[in-house]
Amino acid sequence: MERIQIYKVKKVNVRFFMWFSLFFVIFGLVDLINAFINGFSTKFPGGDWLSVIYILQGITFALMGYQQMKRGKYFIECNEKEFKYLIPKSKSLKCVFIADIEELKMDGIDIRFQAKETEYHIRLEHIEWKELNRVKELIGDLSLRLS
């Protein structure tokens, strides 16, 4: 059984984004509360708007960390009996039995296969070159097994 992660996600990056988002949101909230206690200055530039910017920056870091975590779940997997994949455009895990696959071909970053009256199309966008080569080898081995 071979499982290929489509996107490589470094957990260090996710942790960085999440910790800095927490830091900036807390710092911004403390600064904003302090500004409201001492009288919020609405003068721009200057004033107390920097605390709002810190909060927005923290939210941005959190969204970037969430996006990285979400990208880490996409994969292509093949074992002796079935071909499974989860790609960004599909909402759920797709599982196709290898015995049901009638035709399989890969063209660049597009994988197309026909299985029992259903045509499947996988487009591997923004995949690293090394992982794309592993997918090509996997599809090549699978097509050899089919013929």
Image (cartoon, rainbow, N blue to C red):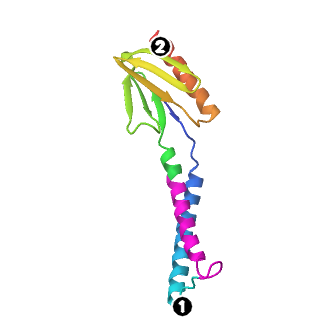
For mark 1, give the secondary structure: loop
Name the N-terminal-most of marks 2 and 1.
1
Q: Position of residue 126 (x, y in %)?
A: 59, 37
Q: Residues within 10 Å of mark 2 (few under 14, many from 20)?
A: few
Q: Position of residue 5 (x, y in %)?
A: 52, 37
Query: Closer to the camera: disc 2 or disc 1?
Result: 1
Identify the residue at the far top of this view.
Answer: 147
The amino acid at mark 2 is Arg
**Residue at 38%, 31% in the rendered image:** 94
The answer to which quarter of the image holds residue 120 is: top left
Is 124 located above or below residue 118 in the figure? below
Q: Which residue matches tag 1? A: 38
**Residue at 51%, 57% in the rendered image:** 63
CA gap between label 2 and label 1 equals: 73 Å
Is 8 located above or below residue 99 in the figure? below
Tell which of 9 and 104 is nearer to you.
Answer: 104
Q: Position of residue 147 (x, y in %)?
A: 47, 9
Is 14 located above or below residue 90 in the figure? below
Magenta region, residue range: 43-66
**Residue at 53%, 23% in the rendered image:** 138
Tell which of 3 and 27 is nearer to you.
Answer: 27
Q: Which residue matches tag 2? A: 145
For mark 2, give the secondary structure: helix
Q: How many marks?
A: 2
